[in-house]
Amino acid sequence: MTKKRTSKPRTVDVATAKVAPAVEKPGKMVRAENLRFSWPFDRKNLIWFLGAIAVIIIGYVFLGHGPYDSVSSMTIGPILLVIGYLILVPVSILVRSKK
């Protein structure tokens, strides 16, 4: 009587990229043949993010420009910083391509 050799499906731990036998922990391991890295951000995300960085830098320039009680450092600078940090950076992360 001969035993059939069956190989267990191999999986790759995404965090450490080590090959290991299949483990029954969902979310921790995935099948090695199904593992394909795909960068979730494309050119549109990069453009939005660079625009956000530009607005944030301009906001800091306005914040430090002129006397402390000027309109640019009291109003325009903080408004640009809020727009950059709270609107443009999240938009740059959440925008999806139409593919």
Image (cartoon, grey):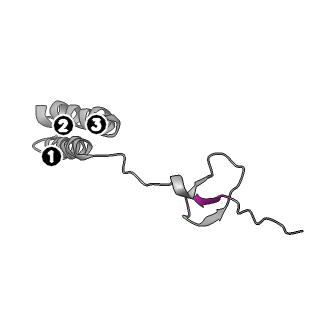
Q: Mark 2 — residue?
A: 77
Disc nearer the start of the sequence (2/3): 2
For residue 86, above or below residue 58: above
Q: Decide which of 54, 95 is in the foreground and name it.
A: 95
> Is 77 situated above or below 54?
above
The disc at residue 61 is 1
Q: Residue furthest right?
A: 1
Question: Please, what secondary structure does the residue beneath circle 2 have?
Answer: helix
Amino acid type indicated by mark 2: Gly
Q: How far from the left and from the top, in percent, is residue 28?
A: 63, 51
Q: Is residue 32 visible?
A: yes
Q: Residue at x 12, y 41 (%)?
A: 67
Percent across and percent down for residue 31 are 59, 54
The residue positioned farthest toward the bottom in the image shown: 2
Mark 2 vs 1, N-terminal side = 1
Indicate yes or no whether the magenta region holds residue 59.
Answer: no
Q: Which of these two is toward me, 50 or 70?
A: 50
- Left of 60 or right of it: where is 14? right
- Between circles 2 and 3, the one closer to the viewer is 3
Of labels 3 and 1, earlier in sequence is 1
User: What residue is rendered at 25% in x and 37% in y?
Assistant: 84
Report whether 93 appears left or right of 26. left
| Type of the residue with mark 3 | Ser
Which residue occupies 79% across, 65% down? 4
Which three-letter amino acid code belongs to the residue tagged 1? Val
**Which residue occupies 56% across, 64% down?**
16
Q: Neighbour class for label 1 at 10 Å: few (<14), some, many (≥20)? A: some
What segment carries the magenta color? 9-15
Asked whether the residues under the numbered discs 2 and 1 touch, taking CB atoms below 8 Å apart as contact, a structural biologist would say yes
Name the residue tied to disc 3. 97
The quarter holding residue 18 reads bottom right
Q: Quadrant of the C terminus?
A: top left
